[in-house]
Amino acid sequence: MRIDRDHPGERGKYDTVEVVVPDVESLRALTVAPGVRAFRVQLRTEQGTESHEFESRVAVRDVVTELGRQAVWPARLPAPGLGTEGIDVRVHNPVGLVLDGSPVPDVGDLDAGQVARLEMQGVPLAYDPTGGLTVEEHSIVVRRAALDAYGAIPRPSVSVVMATRRPDLLDHAMAQVARQRGAPDLQLVLATHGFEADPPGVTVVPMPADAVFGDVLNAGVAAAEGEVVLKMDDDDWYSPDFVADLLRARAYSGADLVGAPDDLYYLEDRDLTVRLGHPGEVYKGFVAGGTMMIGRDLLTEVGGFAPVPRHVDKALTAAVRDAGGSVYRTHGLGYVLRRTASGHTWDADLDDLVARAVQTWQGFRPGRLMEL
């Protein structure tokens, strides 16, 4: 079977799959259907053909994603004279993940110029999970600029699907969507759960109060017009670059479902902000439920949201992975979860959140990327 930019392939088990692109870098923009598995992947470019063979059938989408990533993160050291001699540029922002398994360079062995140059490239070796967020925030800003200038990031149309049973939070919820930038074609689908509303410029889907959560979300998805669906929650805070950051992560990761970690919480009853220290920029099986972005066609293919009152996020993640898809988690500094003692589809143990936190701040401390 052949896969190219016009043919994403067809789910099934194959001995050999041929992937045809102009060059290896083009793999980053190639769409591969989920569920395509093969013993051998032959990559054909204008430079020639290379074959990748495996002992068992592997997901061709994962192979394409990895080869595309390697084209972005070359396995070689930077040229001399840049102040980074001996440092592998594959050290990945923001938590010191090294892509080839070699040790993270010790910042104590580097001079100040080397550290500064690497941090400006988005590799903050001075990262300290118990310290402030300044280095990480700066690296994210720099990375955005680089991706937008050189990354050829596609900007598909996005439908935000938001279910709410709390009319008192409508203004807050709609403001989080209205403040988004870098996503020019954005639709808000508001699934009102047990009440009616008619805000201007919003697609409203009224649902009865006794409808289960998954069915409410699916009703919203049915009214979605975007190529991509993003589930957002009505009570949380989102940075103005939140949607654009997910689109960037979707492009450079090649993942089928992308999201952010549930890293920053504001415990409203205690007036306390906590950070759990969940790593970002990793392929993981879990993303926060209020941050899940997925292609609308794939969402339909895996059956949509499970018709259950709780744990719809976990069920969707499992369905994507069962279909051969991948899940990627970007940074968590553009999202703050609001938590009170009750009233959520997932009621967290607030004492447990505080006990697990790597950082705590008194009051509402969302960080500068939130622009609140």
Image: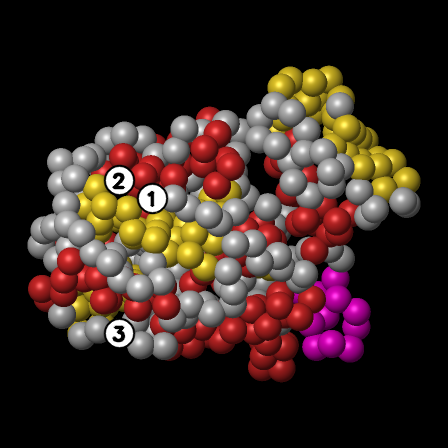
Up-down relation of residue 366 to residue 20 (above or below):
below
Say whether residue 207 is left or right of residue 259.
left
Label 2 neighbour load within 10 Å: few <14, some 14-19, many 20+: many
Q: Main secondary structure of the magenta part?
A: loop
Instruction: Classify mark 3: helix, strand or loop.
Output: loop
Disc 2: which residue? 216
Say whether residue 256 is left or right of residue 52.
left
Instruction: Classify mark 1: helix, strand or loop.
Output: helix
Residue 218 horizontal/vertical position (percent): 33, 37
Say whether residue 49 is left or right of residue 361.
right
- The boundaries of the magenta stretch are 77-89
Q: Nearest the camera: 363 or 372?
A: 372
Residue at (45%, 72%) from the top-left corner? Answer: 137
Disc 1: which residue? 220
Q: Is residue 309 magenta?
A: no
Q: Quadrant of residue 354?
A: bottom left
The quadrant the C terminus occupies is: bottom left
Query: Quick check: marks 2 and 1 in contact, CB under 8 Å?
Result: yes
Check the image and name the residue furthest to the right. Answer: 47
